[in-house]
Image (spheres, rainbow, N blue to C red):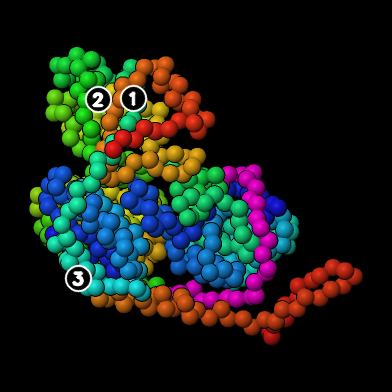
Amino acid sequence: MKISAVNEESILIRFSDDISEETHLRIKSMYKQILNLEGVLSAVPSYNSIMIYYDILKTDYETLKGKLSDFESVPLKSEKKVVVKIPVCYELGIDLDRVSEHTGLSIEQVIEIHASRDYLIYMIGFTPGFPYLGGMDERLTTPRLEVPRTKIEAGSVGIGGEQTGIYPLATPGGWNIIGKTPIKLYDQTHSKTLLKMGQYVRFVPVSQELYRQIEKKIEMDTYEIEVVS
Amino acid sequence: MIGFIVKQAGLLSTFQDKGRLGYQNEGMPISGAMDQEAMILANKLVGKEQGAVLEMTFMGATLVFKKDMAIAITGGDMQPEINNKPVNMYQTIYLKSGDILSFKGLISGFRSYLAFSDILDLDQVYDSKSTYLKIAAGGFKGRKLAAGDEIQVKSCNLPKFGQVVKPYRKEAIRVLLGYESDDFKWPESLFNRPYKVSNDLDRMGIRLEGESLEHKESPDIISSPIIPGAIQVPKSGQPMVMLRDAQTIGGYTRIGTVISCDLDKLAQKKPGDTVIFEAVTLEEAVKIKKEWLKALNEIDLKDDRRHFSVSISGTTYDVYVEEI
């Protein structure tokens, strides 16, 4: 663990130089403790580091560094796995053919493999509500589009290289779009994000008809997102 | 009730406040006024400790006031005028219903700040009224002002008159060399030489052109949190300083971080301007910030005028008397 001053009111703690579930668990446990420290204003966990913003009138770099070093010895507590079910209509995946062609798998196989495991959310960031997901099946690896699209619709589920993810907002993007979810990862109406680091995402294939029904329920604020633990 | 109507919106006029620190774990940028000092002073001059101000970029807005209130203008000088007559910046200005505020044109800086004594009716998202355009959150409908917009306000008492001297700012941008500076061949190349502000600048960041900063190996890192002020260096070797709307996670090596006070100075840089970085230690950076906070706290709003309310035939008039 390396602790460094970023500027006069922020600190970065770096763990290992790779992405692993073990590091993730250490970060998750430490993140919670950090939020309780005197003078801490904000903390941002990520794959292998945590950024901390603090109030220089309440604490200082040396004090925080000392407290953070003490945390290192605190053992990890194993926690219940929380899985958020995300309905995905794969029929709306405009690049499924491309992924199928590149991987040599049938479209049905692509969908089956993609929806067959739970993906750990390593961190949220880049844009509000965007989950960095781990652990996609290597068989699905497909390079990004050579020319990124100028607009990807919100809710698009994609594959970019070895990663899979969901676009929370309509943005430009170069991932292969394999499906779409009506779920809002960033809910503009209520100004809130859905997913949290440490949870898991499970993609549940749904028909276009069911997709429309869920979409309608979300509009009317009557849809309940299924969370299992 | 309507406070003012936007006649001309300017280039990029958005409402901003101190920002939304505390939600970066959800991917929310901090946002807020690009020049925080200018915002704080403008607010003080209208009798507020904090509140949303209008941040105008490069070109000022034209506003028609629909009720009496006080305003103050700070930051970049766009030559403000009331009813086509020049008015001073950095002082309280009392407006009457029907008054028109306009700006003749930018002559210094890049962003101007307008504070109001009334409370503006704006969208609050995650504890802040700052506009974040990318997700259309906060401020006035999550967007920049447009001609025809009507801003609703809640009346507040008029503040007493005040004026301040525009604070002196040291030209150099002070930087704490970073935890990743070892990833560069000659990190000190960043300092004491001019970088030019490119055309590629917005509230998220500013791309600079100048001495190329060579990486020892790859410019890419495992994506990790970044803060406003972070100087990211992509493969081109040309530094990019992240500003208030910086995304929360970034994937390029950071050579160092601009100290928080000096982000205000970068907010006033426009394309073609020069930026010179200077190295500071952590101790120096802490001292600078503490002195800055203290100076703002103790600021003396010089008031040489006396204010009287005079009632004549049922109408109340504000009268200011000053020695000349």
Residue that carries the numbered disc 3 in the rendered image: A66
Is B9 magenta? The answer is no
Badge 3, how many Cα within 10 Å: few under 14, some, many 20+?
few
Q: Quadrant of the C terminus of chain A?
A: top left
Q: How dense is the environment of label 2, judged by Cα within 10 Å: few (below 14), some, or many (20 and up)? A: some
The chief SS type of the magenta part is loop
C-alpha gap between disc 1 and disc 3 = 46 Å
Q: Are marks 2 and 3 on the same chain?
A: yes
Q: Is residue A155 left or right of residue A1?
A: right
Q: Chain of mark 1?
A: A
Region in magenta: B145-168
Q: CA distance from mark 2 to mark 3?
A: 44 Å
Q: Position of residue B280 (x, y in %)?
A: 24, 72
Residue hosting label 1 = A88
Magenta includes B161?
A: yes
Which residue does the numbered mark 2 point to in the structure image? A115
Q: Is residue A164 left or right of residue B204?
A: left
Quarter placement of the N terminus of chain A: bottom left
Residue B209: give x, y in percent of width and height: 27, 53
Image-quadrant location for residue A153: top left
Q: Identify the chain of the residue marked 3, using the numbered disc in the image.
A: A
State the residue at coordinates (21%, 29%).
Answer: A117
- Residue B110 is at least partly visible in this image: no
Instruction: Look at label 1 and name its amino acid.
Output: Val
**What amino acid does circle 3 point to?**
Gly
- Of residues B159 and A179, the one drawn nearer to the viewer in this rendering: A179
Residue found 59% across the figure and 71% down from its top = B47
Residue B296 to residue B60: above or below: below
Element type at marker 2?
loop
Q: Secondary structure at mark 3?
A: helix
